Image (tube, coloured by chain):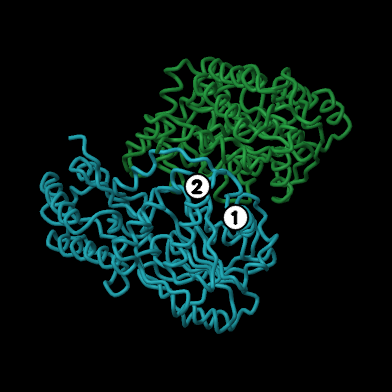
Chain colours: A green, B cyan
Amino acid sequence: MDRDKILLTPGPLTTTLRTKLAMLRDWGSWDSDFNEVTARVRRSLLKVIHGEDSHVVVPMQGSGTFSVEAAVATLVPRDGHVLVMDNGAYCKRAAKLTSLMGRSCTVMPFDEATPVSPVALEAKLTEDKSITHVVLIHCETGAGVWNPLQAVADVCAKHDKGLIVDAMSSFGALPIDARETRFDALIAASGKCLEGVPGMGFVFIRKAVLDGCAGRSQSLAMDLHDQHSYMEKTGQWRFTPPTHVVVALAEAITQFEAEGGQPARLARYTANYQTLIHGMSRLGFMPFLDPSVQAPIIVTFHAPGDPRYDFKAFYAAARQRGFILYPGKLTQVETFRVGCIGAIGPDEMEQAVQAVALVLEDMGIASGEPAI
Amino acid sequence: MDRDKILLTPGPLTTTLRTKLAMLRDWGSWDSDFNEVTARVRRSLLKVIHGEDSHVVVPMQGSGTFSVEAAVATLVPRDGHVLVMDNGAYCKRAAKLTSLMGRSCTVMPFDEATPVSPVALEAKLTEDKSITHVVLIHCETGAGVWNPLQAVADVCAKHDKGLIVDAMSSFGALPIDARETRFDALIAASGKCLEGVPGMGFVFIRKAVLDGCAGRSQSLAMDLHDQHSYMEKTGQWRFTPPTHVVVALAEAITQFEAEGGQPARLARYTANYQTLIHGMSRLGFMPFLDPSVQAPIIVTFHAPGDPRYDFKAFYAAARQRGFILYPGKLTQVETFRVGCIGAIGPDEMEQAVQAVALVLEDMGIASGEPAI
């Protein structure tokens, strides 16, 4: 039937009809009504991290990666030196964009199945004094690892290094408190745990470092300092905002707040995660990560060992039954991923597990058990 | 009453309900259904400029300015030298982003009330052999001037210089034929004359120069060559696409084609323009530009000379009556602007003129006649 499929992907994800309905109007980007929407979104975002006193938030057009690139370009001086703690694909992407824009970049590799190590970071910062900034991915969506933000932030604070946190897939769900955790920049996007539609990101910048960021960016479009100054002065975006995406985000945030904010969202996603894990275990599937390092955002499963398994066929069959899965992003092991986020609850996760069970049956696969 | 205001702005603009309704679904950015939407949009865009044989088209997240920056970064070698033909605010912006990213940039100033001069360009290219690329804004929205694309392209072709055309506010309405007009890149966006919602741009790149563009961009997010290679290989966007914006654009393009494509759109906008100009003349308003250089996209009017005129009050009163006007962008003269584009016809333009008449009456202004 012509029914919307459920997106078990880490953004774009399933949004509520109410959020999408907000897009049925056109808004003048120069108009006061729209400026008020932008202002309201910014106020609400700051509240999520209790950052009203310490941070500003700067919305940015484009996907989340644009905001990551903008944060590095705006925060790191041209002669700065960035250390990227790398335990996955999104870390590698952050390192790549940092090097490309001409900033010195050192990559510190970690196993993709484990969190990055604050102890190793401490040693590195002690050894190499030239490092000015550290980049951390809060939840590495490549495998789904929950990285130790607080411990990393503490090490950075101790050594007085700027910390840039990519919180793309964690913001709004995992706890982040700017009053307790020191970071110079933290990045997220509209189409993730706030359950808006994709099309814009936003970057929290610590007020103490904001002024120093003027003129650092070699990109006009991605200069967060310039975007912020203009917005403070005029209430407007510098360049055409994705108006419909912005109003959808405003509507999504209203629902986020009504649900109970970050703690409620974490509780729902955790319930989704547990339903998924238990259901998939019953079918023999094995998660890639140890539960102790797994964020309840996206789960990587080993591919079944059965020779009849083929990801494309598996994906297509699950899709046919109404569920969009996500391919794996690990280089060494065959996996697939299932997102736990979006406007879905345990009922949808149960249905997804049931769909996977039927798919295995159709494919003649007795168990999801991996080969290893 | 709670009725949508009509946006007389050059994007975001008024879109059809049908276009907005397309955003009521969520799409997986990795899914084949969505890939097919992207592919369809790209095929349709190439048809608009008859560029199937000569060009590729690369969609890009963000506002139109992001695509302009991406085009310069991708097309111009790091040691290239860009000449910007400057007759307005958007030309100055293009020059600024070019310099910021570290490309050598020369600005050739022209009066903002006149088109740029191909003769002057020819002289400049003859004199300065170091210039590698020329940037032209097709319709300078600052004042509304229609710049001579064909003549500029001919000069660039003769001197074998790369031409980068910002066709943001002209694409889809003014004629552009890649079979007759040589350009290396041409940039436009979703929320302009195609009447989609804002949130993405797209860049046509001449196939003959495409391969040479690899590795030129210092920005990962804005690397059009990389975006294109990945899209050709996978059918997907490199980074999360603004899915709802993309499907809205696809729906807008379907309506664009059904209306009769670019010639039909130009005819409707020309009718809008004429209705506006005649109506406003009756009220005493004087357009800033000579009609011979005016594109039927956006019209700059001199502010009324009456001392009771105040733009903020004028804007607010027109808004109250359902019409969103646009502020002027000229530095020397007080003006305001009225867009002729969007999902509106001469009826709406008549209503707008009538609203302006009532606003003048309310403000006690006898005529829109300027002071000069």
Query: Residue at the location (32% across, 43% down)?
Result: A26
Q: Position of residue B8 (x, y in %)?
A: 28, 52
Chain assignment, label 1: B
Report the side of B42 relative to B79 (left or right): left
* Residue type beneath disc 1: Met
- Helix, strand or loop under label 1: helix
B45 to A145, vertically: above or below: below
Which callout, 2 or 1, points at the residue further toward the start of the chain?
A: 2
Q: Amino acid at mark 2?
A: Phe
Q: Which residue is mark 1?
A: B231
Q: Residues within 10 Å of mark 1 (few under 14, many from 20)?
A: some
Badge 2: few (under 14), some or many (20 or more) residues near its Cα, within 10 Å?
Answer: many
Label 2: chain letter: B
Q: Residue at x 57, y 46 (%)?
A: A222
- Asked if residue B106 lies left or right of residue A144, the reply is left
Query: How far apart, in angstroms, are the residues tagged by discs 2 and 1?
Result: 12 Å
Quadrant housing the C terminus of chain B: bottom left
User: Do marks 2 and 1 both belong to one polypeptide chain?
Assistant: yes
* A248 relative position to A337: left or right: left
